[in-house]
Image (cartoon, grey):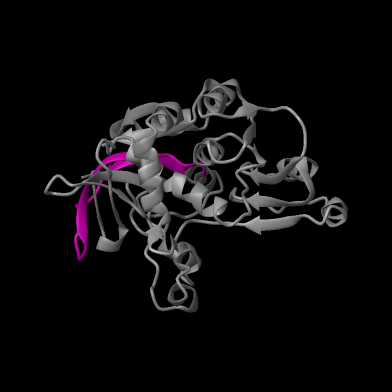
Amino acid sequence: MRAVRTLSGHVQVVDVAPPQGDGIRVRIRSAGICSSDLHLIAAGWPITSTLGHEMAGELSNGTRVAIEPIAPCGHCDSCTRGEYALCRRGAGMIYGVSHDGGMADEIIVPARCLVRLPDGLRPSDACLVEPLAVALHGLRRVPLNPREPMAIVGAGSLGLCTAAMASGYVSGLTVFARHDAQREAAVRLGAQVDGSGEFPVVVDCAGTTEAMAHCVTLCRPGGTILMLATYWQSLTIPALEIGMKSLRLVASSLYDQCGLSRDVDVAAAALAANPLIASTLITHRFPIDAAPEAFQMANNRAAGAIKVVLEP
């Protein structure tokens, strides 16, 4: 079958043997390119597995599913207290990083990874379930008040997923973006763009020193900054201002379960309930054979790329 891998730092489509072993076989219908994929490749990480942790498809009986792309151990201290996003396996549990991911014709995953899609949600759009779950998991960790506003710094796909999950809940949502296409998408999702003011909760979806400084400026005294971005480099933070304003920094990664509901299941329901999310965020679709061109497009935010999707 076809699979997307990195060879000598370059994205290539290669022929590999179909997956074997225990688990459920999923025929992939969509696989999103995440900024994490781009960063890992640019940094030269030695990834030998098939790429792709944002994925959805169909089972042999036609059941439509998205995939929660992690395989926590289930028995470490984090897993046993129900916080499997913090599993001691770390990156070793992530499909598309340490296990073969979804940029392929097929994948085999444990049954626990399956996310059954609500009626009306197409597998071709459901690769968005994973980044929406990341956003939801982070928002659950901060004190959102429906009577107060919120700000998001950074309007890539994660920032816009966060906007999609928060819009309609907070009293006002402001997104700070770099590119026109991102601003237009934020407005479609119910946010206003740029502006000024102070906010009780500010979400960093950019992950740079400059973005964090902006978040600190925007956050009101006693407020909370949600560090939702992946930080690929060390930050220099305005510690004096953070201390003087008594700000609370909250980091968040991946997704897990809150009570009886998994973040991925709630994200799937939200995506099904609002078709505007997929039509706004997915800007480009490529066949899997054009993966090198798709990755080039995903790297070109100035050209309007938000979420670029491969369709095997």
Left or right side of 265 for 151: right
In reply to whether residue 225 is colored magenta, the answer given is: no
Give the total of numbered labels: 0
Where's residue 88, x and y in %?
A: 49, 72
Please name the residue shown 47% across and 55% down the image. 46
Left or right side of 122 for 227: right
Please name the residue shown 49% across and 66% down the image. 90
Inspect this view and state whether residue 122 appears: yes
219 shown above or below 175: below
Where's residue 189, x and y in %?
A: 51, 29
Depth order, front residue of 146/73: 146
Please name the residue shown 56% across and 24% down the image. 187
- Location of residue 79 by image quarter: bottom left
Left or right side of 233 for 236: right
299 shown above or below 200: above
Depth order, front residue of 181/275: 275
- Location of residue 122 by image quarter: top left
Query: What is the quadrant of the N terminus in the image?
Result: top left
Where's residue 182, x and y in %?
A: 56, 27
Where's residue 304, x and y in %?
A: 52, 23
Please name the residue shown 45% across and 27% down the image. 280
- Location of residue 174 by image quarter: top right
Query: Magenta residues?
Result: 9-35
Left or right side of 280 for 62: left
